Amino acid sequence: MTRLNEQEFSNQLIKDFTERNFIKAKIIEIADQYYIAKSDLQSFYDEVLQSSLINEINKEEFINNSLSFIQKSVSNQHQFGYAKTSLRKIIEKQYDFIFSNGFPTNLLNINTGVMTANAGDSAQFLFLARAILAGYNCSNVDVRSSRYDAVVDFNNILLRLQIKGVSSSNAISFKDRDRGGQGIDHTHITNKGKRITSADCDIYVAVDKEIGICYLIPMNYVDSLEEHEITSINLNTLKQYKENWNIIAQVAETRRI
């Protein structure tokens, strides 16, 4: 257990940040004062401060206001009346995730580097769970050196999927990271990240690790991009692939002989 898990110390950290009016630029001061990694402290504040807001919100009022907004926005009130009960249930289910910033993460405050690696694995299994729930026959690939992370069997056609987790940056890259670390020359051509192409996988899946939304991107689209277009791609520009599970069938159709 780290110091961040100790209630007295946590309260002191919140007190110090409150006195600085919750200005993000001041986090480094507190981190240095207590010899904490800035990234770890910011993650702590992100979770604790957002989750504590739930204590000041009336849940029933929030749900009713949300339903009222939807009702005022739709043209057919009979249609709204039909869907109202289902809407209420899903809003109520999602309520807690708003204040936890999606799925709870790193509750044990483990090392940031370790958590980053674990989060990558979690994105992979998040997709697999969702694909299975959606009815697809799929499986994880355990060989870490493989260029794809999972396979989907669609009508006896095996598709290779590379799966990447997406954080709050909401950006993806169709290029591997450069190799780095102690003793590694990241500028050398052999350590440069390789472009991801249809030779590596059939579908690139970006998984939002906060709420599990999946973007299923066919590699024929990725192959069509110019070299300067394959990095720092905002997912807002790929809305046609957001939760588009039909991509699996479409790509499988192109693989038929």
Image (tube, helix red, strand yellow):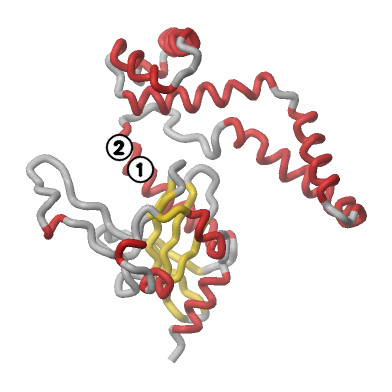
Q: Position of residue 90 (x, y in %)?
A: 72, 45
| Residue designated by label 1 | 118
| Residue designated by label 2 | 114
Seen in the image, is 15 located left or right of residue 140?
Answer: right
Question: Looking at the picture, does residue 106 appear above or below residue 26?
Answer: below
Task: Give the quarter of the figure containing the N terminus.
Answer: top left
Look at the numbered discs 1 and 2 and tell me whether their residues touch, using CB distance below 8 Å. yes
Residue nearest the viewer, comparing 114 with 187? 187
For numbered disc 2, what is the local secondary structure? helix
Seen in the image, is 74 located left or right of residue 151?
Answer: right
Q: CA distance from mark 1 to mark 2?
A: 6 Å
Bin the neighbour count of mark 1 within 10 Å (Cα to Cα): few under 14, some 14-19, many 20 and up: few
- Residue 173 lies in what quarter of the image? bottom left
Determine the residue positioned at 38% across, 22% down: 41
Determine the residue positioned at 66% across, 40% down: 94
For numbered disc 1, what is the local secondary structure? helix
Q: Position of residue 53 (x, y in %)?
A: 62, 22
